[in-house]
Image (cartoon, helix red, strand yellow):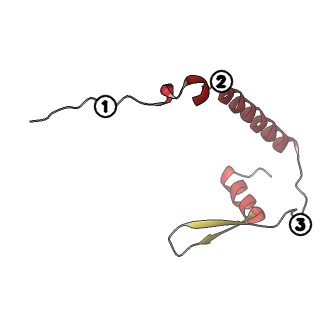
């Protein structure tokens, strides 16, 4: 049986934990303790998704390594120039 993404998210949220409405108006996610009662099955679809996520994290890590740091660039490359002043009538 193939479930929709919404059904999968809903089912995983029930298994992973629950949302609790807070008095301040937001919802907090309360995770269930680990390890789960029923072990996680890594089937073909999940393996593909995990592999894609791992590659995406690798690309992100690689791109972060190319960003200049304050020490190397002296910090000036990270500062924006002040906006020009415009006098309005």
Residue name at image x 23 percent, y 32 percent: 85
Residue 42's spot in the image, x, y percent?
88, 47
Q: Nearer the viewer, residue 40 or 83?
A: 83
In the image, 27 versus 41, the foreground residue is 27
- Determine which residue is flagged by label 3: 37
Q: Considering the numbered disc 3 on the image, is that residue within a helix, a strand or a loop?
A: loop
Label 2 vs label 3: CA separation? 42 Å
Q: How far separated are the C-alphas under marks 1 and 3?
A: 57 Å
Q: Position of residue 41 (x, y in %)?
A: 89, 52
Residue found 74% across the figure and 52% down from its top: 3
Give the quadrant of residue 28: bottom right
Mark 2 and mark 1: Cα distance apart in space: 28 Å
Specify the label residue 66 is tagged with. 2
Task: Answer whether labels 2 and 1 touch (C-beta < 8 Å).
Answer: no
Residue farthest along the bottom direction in this orientation? 23
Is 13 located above or below residue 51 in the figure?
below
On the rendered structure, is 86 left or right of 36? Answer: left
Q: Which residue is mark 1?
A: 83
């Amino acid at each position: 049986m193939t479930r929709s993404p919404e059904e999968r998210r809903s089912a995983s949220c029930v298994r992973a934990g629950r949302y609790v409405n807070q008095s301040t108006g937001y919802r907090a996610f309360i995770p269930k303790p680990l390890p789960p009662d029923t072990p996680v099955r890594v089937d073909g679809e999940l393996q593909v998704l995990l592999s894609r996520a791992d590659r995406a994290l690798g690309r992100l890590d690689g791109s972060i390594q190319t960003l200049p740091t304050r020490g190397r660039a002296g910090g000036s490359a990270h500062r924006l120039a002040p906006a020009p002043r415009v006098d309005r009538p």
